[in-house]
Amino acid sequence: MSTITSAGRLVSTGVIGVLARLATALELLLVFAGILLYIWRLRYTYPWACFLLFVGILLSHVVHRDTPSELGLTTANLDANARIALPLALALYLPMVAYGFARHALVLDILPTRQALAWFAGYGVWCTFQQYLMQSYFHHRLMSVIGNHHLSSLLVAIMFGGAHIPNPILMVVTTVAGFMLAEVFAHHRNIWPLALAQTVGGLLIAAVSPPSLIHHMRVGPGYFFYRIR
């Protein structure tokens, strides 16, 4: 009798676990679809809709009882994450820096202007928010659904690249770099070095890429209206 009860509990737990994973997967699909809808339509008609998406994500953290440490928002794993992410970023960026100086796309200013520093800080905040969405939300959720973190990293990278359609340069860069950063996060949960790496990398990509292709880093419909708006 006890064996039957135990087995029943196991089945019940298994069914509940499967349903929970399916619900999480559906949540991720709906949120990602909402982000794509905002990029392609809502930001032109209902720009405030982004706040609804963000509130939904915050509520998801509450429902799933996520902790700041799990989301990579504390100083935990900061050193271990930085020891991998920053040298990797440096190895990738040095050829771009050399190319930029050779093509005179980059110039060396000993004292950057206030405007340049403010622009760097603003872009850094935006990259930090992107890493929060990519790692703290999507990747954290995917790892709870998929046992293989390599597969979850790949899916996150594809989603990150898909959010940059139709910009050809950003689609490639965000997919490849997105996979690398997701792999680092999977081993050492912390978004701060990843955000710094994205900030510097994004600025380098913008500087050395042909304007005819990068279109001032625009995505969605804005990419096609680069010369108009």
Image (cartoon, helix red, strand yellow):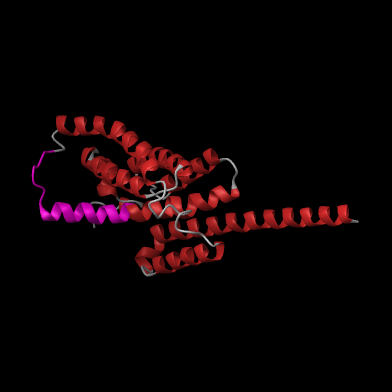
Viewer-nearest residue: 172 or 153: 153
53 left or right of 26 in image: left
- Quarter holding the C terminus is bottom left
Measured as percent of width and height from the top left, residue 69 is found at 45, 54
Measured as percent of width and height from the top left, residue 161 is found at 42, 45
100 left or right of 5 in image: left
Viewer-nearest residue: 154 or 197: 197
12 left or right of 182 in image: right
Q: Which residues are magenta?
A: 107-127
Viewer-nearest residue: 91 or 169: 91
Main secondary structure of the magenta stretch: helix
Query: Can residue 12 be seen by looking at this rendering?
Result: yes
Q: Is residue 53 magenta?
A: no
118 to 172, vertically: above or below: below
Residue depicted at 16% across the width and 37% down the height: 105
Residue lying furthest right? 1
Measured as percent of width and height from the top left, residue 45 is found at 37, 68
- Quarter holding the N terminus is bottom right
Residue depicted at 48% across the width and 46% down the height: 156
Query: Can residue 228 be seen by looking at this rendering?
Result: no
Measured as percent of width and height from the top left, residue 36 is found at 44, 56
Residue depicted at 25% across the width and 31% down the height: 94
202 to 92, vertically: above or below: below
